[in-house]
Amino acid sequence: MKRNSGPVMAQAPPNIALLKYWGKRDSALNLPVADSLAVCLDDFHTTAKMQRADAPADSFVWNGQEMGPPYRSRFQRMVRFARERSARDEVIQAEIKSTLPPRIGLAGSAAAMSAFALALSEFFDMGLHSRELSALARMGSGSAARSIPDGFTWWHRGHLTDGTDSFAETILSHDAWPELRILLIILDTEGKRVSSTDGMVRVAQTSPHFEAWTHQCNFLAPIMLEAIQAQDFEKLSSLAQSNAQTMHALCMTAQPPIVYVSSATLRVLEHLEELRRAHPLFYTLDAGPNPIVFTLDGSLSTIESSLAASFPRASVQACRPGPGARIVKGNGAIK
Ligand code: DP6
């Protein structure tokens, strides 16, 4: 059997949820209570390099720092799965480099965990197909399941207890909607105070609205799927923005309440509502203060200039839908 002896490298993009994942039916495997939909970005990739180490223990270095808990145990969980599946036991050295700061609510961990999952599968010659890879990435971070396949994705919540039916797949390829533009508005790069993992647990345990939220997401998934596949911007706008607003409102109904937005976020959202009167635009927010705007190419430059004039300290980065995770060839140097 062929064995990878040298280093392997994989790259994966962040993905932005249009229908949010917020709630787990199994915390160890990151199995969600509801389906979710997202799109991969064509920029801000994370690279993971993996090689054999002559050392007593695995090492996981992310952005130059050896990982401690909670991330270390997530990487270890995936490695255990790879060892069992491949019946191999090499000690590994993994180096991960992200271009977006982690924990700012902009899918940094999704990109890292999916790049790591693909590198792992290549290193251990696991021969996984896309659905299995997506499920492996999910063990690292739920949303990472959606950074494996190309473009717009649907992550099925699945029903099995082992999680094998909880994976993401492409519903529209990244180049099928060429007018779509995605703007990351980075207001704050400080890490969030409550992690997504903890936030989901607190909401599930204390919010009286959690069950209604879950039902609503599962009801909306096929409707949003249709809007994406029909490239119906208007319909997607109202569905996606309202879903993000609902998720943040839900977080505020937890005890104690979780507030991810800041006063700067609220000022930007007001400004976006003004711009929305004249331009095709909607926004979403992950578990952090940094809004993400979806628009069409004809309105991009007006929106960018307007944001630059009103929020000179914000960094605004324009992206398009992008492909999923891939193996990268090279001489082993991580850029
Ligand atoms: C708000 O995937 O980071 O971005 O599975 O606990 O690692 P864990 O959570 P994570 O949660 C992402 C939450 C979100 C919404 C989304 O991406 O769907």
Image (cartoon, rainbow, N blue to C red):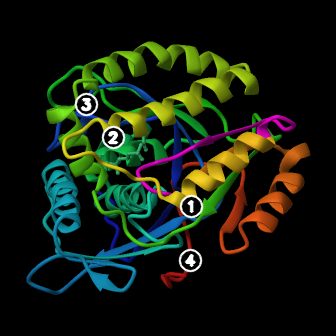
The label nearer to you, 3 versus 4, is 3
Q: Amino acid at mark 1?
A: Ala
Residue 290 drawn at (x, y percent): 54, 58
Q: Earlier in the sequence, mark 1 or mark 2?
A: 2
Instruction: Name the disc covering residue 250, or none.
Output: none
Q: Earlier in the sequence, mark 4 or mark 1?
A: 1
Identify the residue at image location x=14%, y=26%.
161
Task: Answer yes or no: is residue 20 visible.
Answer: yes
Residues at badges 3 and 4 in contact (C-beta under 8 Å)?
Answer: no
The label nearer to you, 1 versus 3, is 1
In the rendered structure, the answer to whether residue 104 lies left or right of residue 41 reads left
Q: Earlier in the sequence, mark 3 or mark 4?
A: 3
Q: Amino acid at mark 3?
A: Thr
Q: Which residue is mark 1?
A: 264
Instruction: Name the disc covering residue 330, or none.
Output: 4
Q: Which residue is mark 3?
A: 164
Q: Which residue is mark 2?
A: 252
| Separation (CA) of disc 2 from disc 3 | 33 Å
Quadrant of the image occupied by residue 124: bottom left
| Separation (CA) of disc 3 from disc 4 | 32 Å
Q: Amino acid at mark 2?
A: Met
Residue 324 drawn at (x, y percent): 55, 49
Q: Amino acid at mark 4?
A: Gly
